[in-house]
Amino acid sequence: MNLLYIALDAKNYALRICNEMAKQGHKITCMVLNKDFFDNEVKIDMEENITVFELQQKEFYKADIFLKKYFEHIKNANVDAIFGVSILATPIVDYLATLLKKPKYMMLLDVPIDLIEKEPARKRDWGYHVPLLKRMNDVIFSTKIARDEFNRVYGKYYPNDNIVTYPTFLPEKFFKSGIKNDEGYIVSACRLTPTKNCIIIPYAMSKLKTVNTYVAIGKDGGQLKQIRHACEKFGINFVHYDGITDERKFEIIKGASMMIYPQDSKYIGGLAPFEGMFVGIPVIVPNLKVLKDLYQGNCSYFDNGGIYSLATQIAMLSLLKKEYLIDRLEISAEFSKQEVSFEKAAKGILNVLEE
């Protein structure tokens, strides 16, 4: 297949998926943002049968600029199909496919119904994009609940083959590297937003005598000040990292006693728990169907929003000797390595596109 891949998600994720597609014998023209959301320092060696265009975000949204700079390149590539990732890529995928008379496909990372209903701007955007999505040749979803909610709310069903778990970068050197490590702190690795709900972590830690340091990796999305204040209030040591490399992130995760991913939404998934599993540390998440579908029996679960329930899980994992967890951590690491590989995601996407 000769594919045009338009990505408005993380640049490096897109490049890695395109590399895997190329390794499987496909020719790819990849259009990505010129900056990565997470680690802009890493450089990825691309396969020979890939052409990459790095765009500023505004270029994806202004048709006159986009067509003037890139249309001839796309036309000359003579692609067989056009594929986009992220709801925001829907208009340009639809527009180009119509101009070129090519099949068109999209992948949605989440369908966050709670936020769509709560935020007028987001609701307006989805109202514009959904009719375009419904006329795609096919749509891929990263979670079962995203597929199910799209059907429930917008009235179009897609089969299980259209569910492809989104991958994440797992550096091989860190595989199981944390199984025997424990430097005595709790880590989270996600944006500090109300939806991610990391504020619950210091409140749960305040009920315990066992662990007294919380390390948060991720950009502030409106909750950093509250988290810092709660840690000061309860006498918890707090360390915050933002804008660090993948290498540094995994070094921090490797030393943690456990990872907590406490999101307060039943509609979105998360990649950070796979990172914790891969390294070989215990991971605690809320007991939500979307997360159980993703992580299965490889995490510890607490009642969503329950401070004492989370504290109980922390206490149990803190008090257990690591030797009693090793078998479980080994299994979870292997599960993560297989479940969110870029190779597996590329194959899943291509299976849908080639049907």
Image (cartoon, helix red, strand yellow):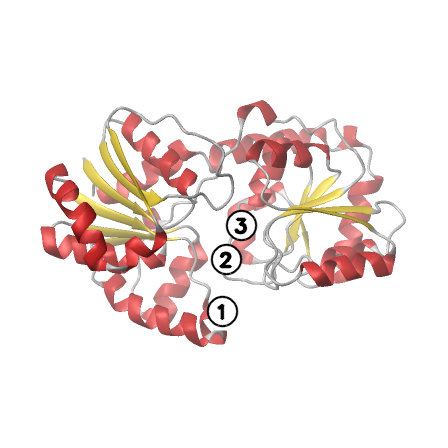
Q: Earlier in the sequence, mark 2 or mark 1?
A: 1
Position of residue 296 measured from the top left corner of the image (x, y, whole percent):
56, 45
> What separation in Å lies between label 1 and label 3 (alpha carbons)?
16 Å
* Residues at discs 3 and 2 in contact (Cβ within 8 Å): yes
Distance Cα–Cα, label 2 vs label 1: 10 Å
| Residue 268 marker | 2
- SS for tag 2? loop
Q: Can see residue 136?
A: no
**Res. 121 image quadrant:** bottom left
For the residue carrying disc 2, how many other residues have a C-alpha within 10 Å: few (<14), some (14-19), or many (20+)? many
Q: Residue at x 43, y 30 (%)?
A: 43
- Bin the neighbour count of mark 3 within 10 Å (Cα to Cα): few under 14, some 14-19, many 20 and up: many
For this view, does 344 lie left or right of residue 2? right
Residue type highlighted by circle 1: Leu
Q: Position of residue 328 (x, y in %)?
A: 67, 33
Classify 10 Å Cα crowding around label 1: few (below 14), some (14-19), many (20 and above).
some
- Which of the numbered marks, if any, corresponds to residue 221? none
- In the picture of the structure, the residue carrying the numbered disc 1 is 115
